[in-house]
Amino acid sequence: MEYGKVNKLKIARVAENGYYLVDDKNEEVFLAAEQVKDSHKTGEEIDVFIYKDKSVVVSAKLPLVQMEEFANLKVKYVNDQGAYVDWGLDTDLLVPFDEQISEMKEGQYYVLFVFEDEETGRLFGSQRADEFVFFDEIDVERGDEVDLIIHRESDLGINVIVNNLYKGLIFKSDLHKRVKLGEKIKGYVKHVREDGKIDILLEPLGYKESIVSNTQVILNTLGEHQNYIPLTDKSDPNDIKRILGLSKKAFKRSIGHLYKQKKIDIRQDGIYLIK
């Protein structure tokens, strides 16, 4: 049985006021009847979240984040103990003042790590990401697809949390689409540095090179045809292939890139080069 985690437990017996649940080691906890909407029978398995507050709490309502995970959470209120955030349970998660690196305000969202206090076993939130990520024994390598949480902006780009374990950076030069702080997205490992930080791309390796190559094809063709091509994102794939030699997917991706750079104008009758 893991505290601070979601556990799948078996109902050992049913009481008038709830259920006695056991794990595969026959360790037992009690789940109050008001915690569940439907009735259950002996032998059924049920997912519960178990954590320590003033006593052990067994909840059939599952949290937005578990122990040793990062999540983007909203502050419900602030008092003299710290900021209390909504993590999906009836009781709120406390982020003490000494675990804050910026003033946390009611109604705002913050990327937080959930950790267990060694003395009490209680769970708290923390903004201090660097204290909870690993900078050695990095278990990802160049080209790997990874899970990201957009953490915070920096002078170099966007800092991200990688696989809930590592610290990563998307350089400004590699940002080809908008991202929002706290957003969960996929990314790709560009480089693992000696200091344990990871450079991240938002597209698979080779994407940037193909974009550059394909956009140049379009620009060259525009130049050869009086700055106009009779193609749009609704054009037949065979026409796109005949005129440009590109797949429709590569074509749409490339004209989108050129449009954002304000190098082309996309109209109903085709694409025009902007001079």
Image (cartoon, grey):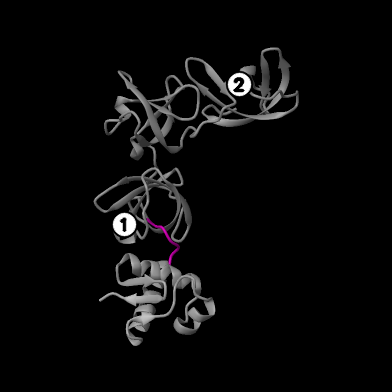
Residue 120 point in image, percent of width and height: 44, 19
SS category of the residue bearing label 2? helix
Question: Which quadrant holds residue 62?
Answer: top right
* Marks 2 and 1, the one that precedes in the sequence: 2
For the point 34% across and 79% down, the residue is 219
**Residue pushed farthest bottom?**
224
- Residue 32 visible in the current orientation: no
Q: Tell me the amino acid under the disc marked 2.
A: Gln
Residue 171's disc is 1
Q: Taking 7 as reference, is 187 left or right?
A: left
Q: Is residue 106 magenta?
A: no
Q: Which residue is mark 2?
A: 35
Residue 216 point in image, percent of width and height: 35, 78
For the point 39% across and 67% down, the residue is 256
Image vertical order of residue 74 relative to residue 27, above or below: below
Which segment did they paint magenta?
A: 200-206
Q: Please rate how many residues cluster around mark 2, counting C-alpha atoms within 10 Å: few if below 14, some from 14 to 19, many from 20.
A: some
The chief SS type of the magenta part is loop
Residue 8's disc is none
